[in-house]
Structures are given as structure tokens and as C-alpha cells.
């Protein structure tokens, strides 16, 4: 793994007994000494610390935050101009066919926008933003001197408040600049587990000190990519490149909640983003397929790539699984995937083909666990 990049916390991961694996061009911890199952349950019950420094942290600067926001709206189908200062919003880059090129978090920091993109998409996202935004007077800058930590779980507030009690005032999707371990940190109250928690951008030379200060607290354990994946799956959250990609539209992906009315048909800033014609047509007329939750019967998980059928025998596939595994919190297998719209209603009985045998699966509401965001 010599050619892989390393985050500022790499040596700490080794010290903590992490098993390291290649992920998105980085050497990343997949699990620690607790193991994936116990790490998952610890994050649900107490607090888990995740290293997400491989993600791309980008500053968009320009003449004013209003001009930056309007420029970014030409690339995303999201209301950025209406995003209040010190608030964050989920969004995605779309392509001319209506597909999703990446999903991202966008924060209004008063005089600039702060954007976090997926690790595997950093290079293409930067090229996309430069091409689309620089002609409009907006400069994207990928930061190379900050780490990113995520602290997730019901004890996350207490753990972070022990370092600075100001974080108790934050609500879901708030962003703030807060001093931690003597460093200026940019914090959002958000995350990728369905639990309350925070994402913390910290200068890289202070990242280890901050991580140690959090891990020194009894409630906090380090959590790897394995549990991160099962946590987000139970929470019904998409993983880019699996549940959403350049061939899936936001309507198919059940992400219509992220496109505000002002950008939809009849809205004051209707359209104006790549793929708007197709996406807005699907809003108005429906999409041919939908991302749904799936609950396999029995104990056998249905993993990514499993084909879904309407009947126990015969017929063509009507969909496929995009993410699946055992849900430690639910105590049973859970999955998500795409099925044609005629079979997408919750409670619909379907069949997944696993090793040549069709096993019963039921379309289910997501999330599979109750989200505990502090609103």
C-alpha cells in the first residue's frame, strides 16, 4: 500500500490496532480491536470517532456569498442562494442526462461557501467546479492542510462539549467556528450514521491532539469503515458509486427532498442546472424506477449486485440490490436497491437471487433505524 495516500491520523490508527485497507486512494482503517459489530453498536449507544480526512474540503470564494451561491446553483439543483449564514445543506452535482456525478455538503460561512465532496471524486469535482464556476467569478480551492473527523452517537454532544461547551447550542445542519485543543475548528452538526453528531474540520497539525482528547473520554471509541458502512445503510443513506451514480437521477434515488421548491417546475429559480429537463419531468410525471429499502426474510444478507425478481420462478429481473448486509442494530439483514416503480410500494413481496436460489424479500420503508438528529 506504499502508493496510497495517508491521512494525518495514520500513525494513530496503527497505534490503536487498526486493520488498514485501500479506500478511495487512501490507506484507511476498516476496523479496530473491537471489531465491526461492536464498533457499530458502540456508535449507536455511545459515541464513535471516524477519520474522514480523505474527503475533499473545498472553499468557494468570489465577490460575495450571494454571487457564489447563484453560480453554484448552475451545477446543483439545490437552493443555495436561500441557505442562511452558518447553515449547511445536502446537494449533488448532476449531468446533462440527469444523473448524479457526486453528492456533497454545502455550508454558508458568511463570506464564502465551504463544500465537502467524496474522496474518490475530488479530482473530477474540482475540474467540474473550475470549468463551471471560474467563468462566473468564483474560485474553488481544495484545502490540503486540514483533517476531517466525525464524532457520532448519542454521547457525541457531551464528548465534544467537554472540550468546548459552545457546541451544545448547535442544531442539526448548523455550522460554526469553535476553538478545540487551541485550534480553530469548523464544525457542522451532521454526519453519516443517522445519529446525532458532528463533523470537525481541524488543522492537520492539531488533528492527532484533537483525536486523542476525544478518545480519552470513556464514551468514545475509534470506528472504522466497516461499521461506517453498516451504520449508514441502517440509516438509509446513499453511498456514492453504489446507491447513486452518474446513471441514477435524484428522483429515482428518492432524493427529491433535497431539491427545494424554488428550483422545481414553477419555482422562482426553476431549472438552470445540468439535466434539469429530465429531472423536472420525472418530478412531474414520475420515474420508471425507485430506490427502496429491502428486508430479506431469514438470516442471509442480500449484498450489492443481487438481482430482484417479481416471482419465485421465471421472468426477467425487475431490479437489483445496491447495498446490503447484516444490520447489527436491527438484528437482521437489511438492503437497499432499485426496483421498477410498479413494485416499489412498501410491503411488496419480491425475490432476490442468491447463488442461484430465489429468496423472499420485502420492500420496506427507510430508514431502518430511527434517526436521532438534534433539530
Image (cartoon, grey):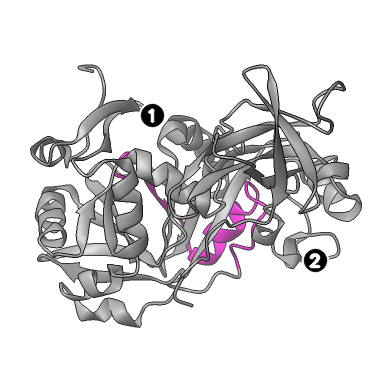
Q: Is residue 362 left or right of residue 198?
A: right
Q: Residue 35 location, x and y as percent?
A: 26, 41
Q: Is residue 63 left or right of residue 70?
A: left
Q: In the displayed structure, would residue 61 be above or below residue 87?
A: above
Residue at image coords 57%, 33%:
242
- Quickly name the residue at label 1: 24
Q: Residue 8 location, x and y as percent?
A: 17, 40
Q: Is residue 283 left or right of residue 142?
A: right
Q: Residue 113 location, x and y as percent?
A: 45, 59
Q: In the displayed structure, would residue 294 be above or below residue 108?
A: above
Q: Dot 2: within a 10 Å radius of its alpha carbon, few (fewer than 14), some, or many (20 or more) residues?
A: few
Q: Does residue 78 show up magenta in the picture?
A: yes
Along the line of sight, the residue nearer the viewer: 64 or 190:
190
Q: Is residue 342 left or right of residue 191?
A: right
Residue at image coords 47%, 49%:
232
Q: Which dot marks residue 79?
A: none
Stretch of the chain drawn in magenta: 52-81
Q: Does residue 350 show up magenta in the picture?
A: no
Is residue 253 something one can see in this rendering?
no
Q: Dot 1: within a 10 Å radius of its alpha carbon, few (fewer than 14), some, or many (20 or more) residues?
A: some
- Quickly name the residue at label 2: 267
Give the mark nearest the N terminus, 1 or 2: 1
Q: In the displayed structure, would residue 78 be above or below residue 34?
A: below
Residue at image coords 61%, 34%:
322
Mark closer to the observer (1, 2):
1
In the picture as drawn, the residue positioned furthest to the front comes out as 298
- Tell me the CA gap for discs 1 and 2: 38 Å
Disc 2 on helix, strand or loop? loop
Disc 1 on helix, strand or loop? loop
Amino acid at each position: 500500500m506504499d502508493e496510497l495516500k495517508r491521512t494525518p491520523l495514520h500513525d494513530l490508527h496503527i497505534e490503536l490496532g487498526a486493520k488498514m485497507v485501500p479506500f478511495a486512494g487512501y490507506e484507511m482503517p476498516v476496523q479496530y480491536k473491537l471489531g465491526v459489530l461492536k464498533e457499530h453498536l458502540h456508535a449507536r449507544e455511545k459515541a464513535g470517532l471516524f477519520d474522514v480526512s480523505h474527503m475533499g474540503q473545498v472553499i468557494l470564494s468570489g465577490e460575495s456569498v450571494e454571487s457564489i451561491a447563484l453560480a453554484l446553483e448552475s451545477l446543483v439543483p439545490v437552493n443555495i442562494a436561500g441557505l442562511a449564514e452558518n447553515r449547511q445543506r445536502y446537494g449533488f452535482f448532476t449531468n446533462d442526462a440527469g444523473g448524479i456525478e457526486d453528492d456533497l455538503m454545502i455550508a454558508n460561512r458568511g463570506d464564502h461557501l465551504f463544500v465537502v465532496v467524496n474522496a474518490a471524486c475530488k479530482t473530477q469535482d474540482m475540474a467540474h467546479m473550475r470549468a463551471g464556476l471560474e467563468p462566473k467569478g468564483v474560485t474553488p480551492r481544495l484545502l490540503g492542510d486540514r483533517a476531517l473527523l466525525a464524532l457520532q452517537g448519542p454521547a457525541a454532544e457531551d464528548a465534544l462539549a467537554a472540550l468546548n461547551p459552545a457546541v451544545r447550542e448547535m442544531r442539526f445542519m448548523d455550522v460554526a467556528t469553535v476553538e478545540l485543543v487551541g485550534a480553530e475548528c469548523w464544525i457542522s452538526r451532521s454526519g453519516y450514521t443517522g445519529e446525532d453528531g458532528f463533523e470537525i474540520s481541524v488543522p492537520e497539525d492539531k488533528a492527532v491532539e484533537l483525536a486523542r482528547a476525544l478518545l480519552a473520554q470513556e464514551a468514545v471509541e475509534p470506528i472504522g469503515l466497516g461499521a461506517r458502512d453498516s451504520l449508514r445503510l441502517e440509516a438509509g443513506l446513499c453511498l456514492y458509486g453504489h446507491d447513486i451514480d452518474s446513471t441514477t437521477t435524484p428522483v429515482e434515488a428518492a432524493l427529491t427532498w433535497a431539491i427545494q421548491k424554488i428550483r422545481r417546475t414553477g419555482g422562482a429559480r426553476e431549472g438552470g442546472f445540468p439535466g434539469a429537463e429530465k429531472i423536472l419531468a420525472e418530478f412531474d410525471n414520475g420515474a420508471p424506477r425507485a430506490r427502496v429499502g429491502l428486508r430479506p426474510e431469514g438470516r442471509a444478507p442480500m449484498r450489492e449486485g443481487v438481482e430482484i425478481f417479481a416471482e419465485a420462478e421465471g421472468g426477467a429481473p425487475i431490479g437489483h440490490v445496491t447495498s446490503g448486509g447484516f444490520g447489527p442494530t436491527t438484528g437482521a439483514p437489511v438492503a437497499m436497491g432499485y426496483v421498477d416503480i410498479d413494485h416499489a410500494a412498501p410491503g411488496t413481496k419480491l425475490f432476490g437471487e442468491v447463488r442461484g436460489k430465489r429468496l423472499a424479500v420485502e420492500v420496506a420503508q427507510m430508514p431502518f433505524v430511527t434517526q436521532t438528529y438534534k433539530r
